[in-house]
Amino acid sequence: MDETVAEFIKRTILKIPMNELTTILKAWDFLSENQLQTVNFRQRKESVVQHLIRLCEEKRASLNDAALLDIICEDVDLFDMKQFKNAFKKILQRALKNVTVSFRETEENAIWIRIAWGTQYTKPNQYKPTYVVYYSQTPYAFKSSSTLRRNTPLLGQALTIASKHHQIVKMDLRSRYLDSLKAIVFKQYNQTFETHNSTTPLQERSLGLDINMDSRIIHENKVEKERVQRITQETFGDYSQPQLEFAQYKLETKFKSDLNGSILAEREEPLRCLIKFSSPHLLEALKSLAPAGIADAPLSPLLTCIPNKRKNYFKIRDK
C-alpha cells in the first residue's frame, strides 16, 4: 500500500470518535468481519489505528478505497460542535461555579477555547486566562502554560468527555509555536515545513573546498562531507524542521564502581542530572551540527528522536 494512501486512511480514522469507529468500518465494508474481530477496540486509539493500517496494508488498499472511507465519514455527523461546547462548559461550571468559557472556531477543525478560572468563592480572573486549542475528532489539544496545576485534571476531564474520546493524549512536548507542535503531533512536518525539495545529486553540490588543496585531501574531504550530508538528510530530511526552543533530559542512575566501600556506591538514592539544550530553533541547530564539523555523524538518537517520539522532555533511568 502506498505511503500516501496509508497516511490518508490514518488521518481519516483518527477523525472518527471511538464510539462510531466500528459502525463506520462496517459501513466501509473493506475489512472483513473476521479482520475486524482481531482488533481490540478497547486499546488506546493510536494502537487501534496502527492495527487497522496493518490490515489495510495486507489487503493493499487503494486511493479509491481510502476516498470511500472519507465519503462515509462525511455522510455521518461525527462531531457536533454545539454539543461539544455545551458539554465542555457544563463540566467546568459544575465543578467550579465561577468560570468563564469562550469559544472561537477556526479553519482545520480547530476550536480555540479561553478559560478564566475562578473558585466556588472567587470570581474568574480575566487577567490570567488559559488558552486551549482543540482539534475536533482527534485526541489532541494544546494548552497554554498559564493553566493552574490544580485545574489541569479538570480541564483534561472536560475535554475527554466533551470530545467523546477515550482519553486526551498527554505528551511531554512544549513550544511557543503552535504550528510546530501541531506538525509534530500529527506528523506533518515533512509537508508543513517543506521549503525546498533538492534533487541535485550530492556529488554535484558545492562543498566549499579550497582549490589549492592537495588532491588527495580534497578527495578524502569530499567523501567524508558526502557521508555526513547523506546521514544528515536521512535523519532530518531535506526540509525545514518544526520550531522548538529546547530539549530537556533528566538522568537518574546508580553509581557504579568496582571499588568496595565507596561512599557513592553505598548511596541508596540515584544520582540525578539535568541537561537542557536551548536554541531559537533547536532542531535546525541539531541538523547543522555534523555538516558544520561540530559533532560526528550520526548524532545520538536521544537528539534526533524528538519529532518521532513527539516529546522534548526525557527521563532516562537505569534499566
Image: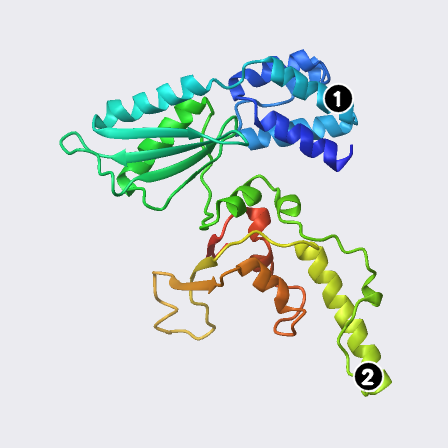
Dividing the picture into quarters, in which one does residue 32 lie?
top right
Q: Position of residue 161 (x, y in %)?
A: 40, 23
Q: Which residue is mark 1?
A: 65
**Picture residue at 57% right of the left edge, 43% below the top:** 183
Kindly state the secondary structure of the residue where label 1 is placed. helix
Identify the residue at horizontal 77%, vertical 28% (top origin): 58
Q: Label 1 is placed on what type of residue?
A: Asp
Q: Is residue 76 left or right of residue 163?
A: right
Residue 61, visible in the rendered structure: no
Coordinates of residue 132 in the picture (x, y in percent): 40, 37
Q: Residue furthest right?
A: 215
Identify the secondary structure beneath mark 2: loop
Q: Measuring from the top left, give residue 223's x and y in whole percent.
A: 81, 72
Q: Which residue is mark 2?
A: 211
The mark total stands at 2
Q: Residue at x 25, y 35 (%)?
A: 117
The disc labelled 2 sits on which kind of residue? Ile
Residue in the foreground of this view, choosing between 71 and 58: 71
Asked which quadrant contains residue 226, the reply is: bottom right
**Which of the image's four quarters has the N terminus?**
top right
The answer to which of marks 2 and 1 sits earlier in the sequence is 1
